[in-house]
Image (tube, rainbow, N blue to C red):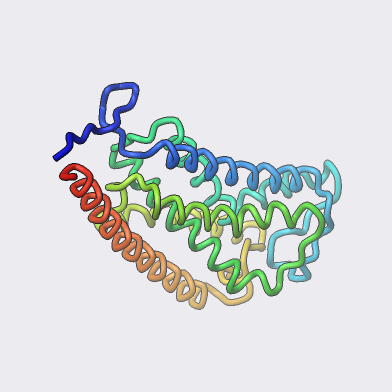
Amino acid sequence: MSTHTSRVNSSGKPASVSPTGHHFFGLNALAAWLGLATAFVLSILGVYPNTNLDPTLLGFNADGADGLIGRVSDSLSYFTHWSNLVVAIVMTMLWRNSNRTSKVFAVFRFDALIMITITGLVYALILAPVDKLQGWQYVSNALEHYLTPLLTIAVFIFFGPRGQVRLRLIPLALILPLIWVAVALIRGSIIGAYPYGFINVATWGYGTVAINLLGIVIFGSGLGALYCGIESWMTQRTKNVATATTTE
């Protein structure tokens, strides 16, 4: 029987994440930041004209400096940008310190996972068929709606860190998405325009929108439960591998 020695970090504590995982945390953060930065610059510059024809959806702002505040405000209203920002912050924090164990951080880690998955799926299944992109929008779109969601899910599955996704945290992880809903509805009631069709009260009314949002909450809870199952399976797998390595 050989002696197994745990790898330790600079603080002398057992490291929970491999060097490869640490690098992927950084890559995940970089993809999210790049997508956000590209989209934000495009919003500031107003390079591409609005192709939306529905006045109850966001996007109708003046060209040039006159429409700057409106374009930036609209940009900050999209769930896509909220979810990518949460991923960017969380993965940057993990890249800087992979051994975070606080409950607050665990909730935001869970937030990042659930929110970015919803972003990717809703875009691919509902929004992509009707979205009209131009030039650099293809870059920001690919980063925010495809690469970052897929990378975030893959990094969670293969690199963890384990122990931060738990069933009892699902209700807490839904608070931030519900805050986005509240902000979008309040702003929409003021300016008469909404970020997405499924939350467009001007078109569907509060009843239908409430049903749509309830469906998304249920879906988000289901995603949370699914990720908890994956977490449990990967945790047990990691323990089995560690035990087998120790006893060799």
The residue depicted at 64 percent of the width and 52 percent of the height is 143
Query: Residue 34 in the image: x percent, y percent?
Result: 64, 43
Is residue 185 found left or right of 19 in the rendered image? right
Is residue 24 found left or right of 125 in the rendered image? left
Towards the viewer: 242 or 66: 242
Residue placed farthest to the top in the image?
11
Is residue 216 found left or right of 31 in the rendered image? left
The residue depicted at 49 percent of the width and 38 percent of the height is 23
The residue depicted at 33 percent of the width and 26 percent of the height is 9
Towards the viewer: 240 or 180: 240
Across the whole image, how many numbered discs are drawn on residues?
Answer: 0
User: Height in image: 75 above or below 220?
Assistant: above
Determine the image quadrant of residue 187: bottom right
Residue placed farthest to the front in the image?
1
Query: Residue 142 in the image: x percent, y percent?
Result: 66, 57
Determine the image quadrant of residue 132: bottom right
Query: Residue 179 in the image: x percent, y percent?
Result: 45, 53
Determine the image quadrant of residue 65: top right
Q: In the picture, which quadrant includes the C terminus?
A: top left
Query: Residue 61 in the image: x percent, y percent?
Result: 78, 54
The residue depicted at 85 percent of the width and 50 percent of the height is 63
Q: In the picture, which quadrant includes the N terminus?
A: top left
User: Height in image: 87 above or below 153?
Assistant: above
User: Height in image: 200 above or below 40?
Assistant: below
User: Height in image: 68 above or below 77?
Assistant: above
